[in-house]
Image (cartoon, rainbow, N blue to C red):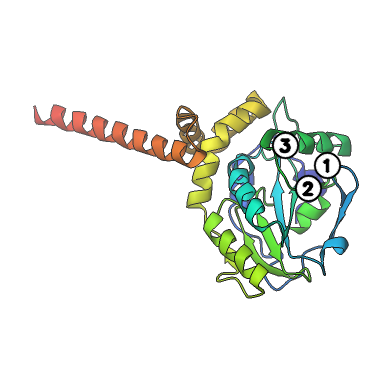
Amino acid sequence: MTSATDYLYDHVTRKVLMEDMPFGEQAPRPGDRLPPFDLPSVDGGRINTADIFGRKPLLLITGSYSCPMTASSDPVLKQFHHEFSRDIDFVMLHVREAHPGEHREQSRSFEEKLEHAQALKARDQLPWPIAVDDPQGTVHRALDEKPNAVWLTDRDGVIVYRALWAGDDKGLEQALDAVIRGVAPPQQESRRRLAPMAMGVGKMREMTLQSGPRATHDMWRAAPPMAAMAWLADLYRPLPPKWRTIAAVATLGIAVTAVATAAGRRRNR
């Protein structure tokens, strides 16, 4: 677990991006109890796990306004909410900003963090409640600080499934269906990256532009290939995020093939 000071970064770095890729050794895992919390809600009042456990299973999602993974996974999660929310409580934990910038700075007060959470709920029209973590990220740090992970518990608050990225829709759908039926999910964990990250890259430039020029610049410094792919994918709006990235990869492939073909012809002259 990082210190509260390190937690509140102002610039995305390669180190930050690499730490998002795996679950840490100390992260709660299936069979553990979800860390309890009692936090303010965007809609007023409080969200207390003590009021949920014993009544319904809980799907806890981490997210933030500037996170492209959050923005890209929210449509899928809204479909699941429509299908499963009668039997499972959905709660998002608003955490630190994934890509802080001039327009959306890292929150250092509760008021700022609440404002960001309210903006996220309004922008993405989220139907589930959002719990607002404290600026030091006390609950988030207990959950391993991932920007857009999911944690599914049974009625007693015991974790039955976790996923590194909320956009891994296939594994999450199976787990949600299983917990309603009172059986163990087919898999207890997902660390899949390719498909969820393709969705995230498709929203990355859009989100960093919303956050501010610094956020865009930081991505170019931290991960130039990813930033370049995000720039290219953004040209394919309004395609869905995953298809923007697929189109970008196809465009890049065509360009590389064309260059290689032209170079081969010159050599054969």
Residue 26 in sight from this viewpoint:
no
Quickly name the residue at label 1: 42
Q: Is residue 103 left or right of residue 164?
A: right
**Label 2 with label 1: CB-CB less than 8 Å:** yes
Q: Looking at the image, tell me whether mark 1 or mark 3 is earlier in sequence order.
A: 1
Q: Is residue 252 left or right of residue 237?
A: left
Whole-angstrom CA distance, mark 3 to mark 2, is 11 Å
The quarter of the picture where the C terminus appears is top left
Q: Is residue 226 left or right of residue 65?
A: left
**Label 3 with label 2: CB-CB less than 8 Å:** no
Q: Residues within 10 Å of mark 2 (few under 14, many from 20)?
A: some
Quarter of the rendering containing residue 69: top right
Q: Could you tell me which secondary element the residue under label 1 belongs to?
A: loop
Quarter of the rendering containing residue 188: bottom right
**Label 1 with label 3: CB-CB less than 8 Å:** no
Name, please, the residue furthest toward the bottom.
183
- Closer to the camera, 175 or 264? 175
Quickly name the residue at label 2: 129
Amino acid at pointer 3: Leu
Q: What residue is at 52 percent from the left and 46 percent from the top?
A: 197
Q: Is residue 233 above or below residue 130?
A: above
Which one is in front in this view, the residue at disc 3 or the one at disc 2? 2
Residue 142 in sight from this viewpoint:
yes
- Closer to the camera, 193 or 108? 193
Q: Position of residue 190 (x, y in %)?
A: 56, 62
Quickly name the residue at label 3: 120
Q: Position of residue 154 (x, y in %)?
A: 73, 69
Q: Looking at the image, tell me whether mark 2 or mark 1 is earlier in sequence order.
A: 1
Q: What residue is at 77 percent from the left and 39 percent from the top?
A: 117
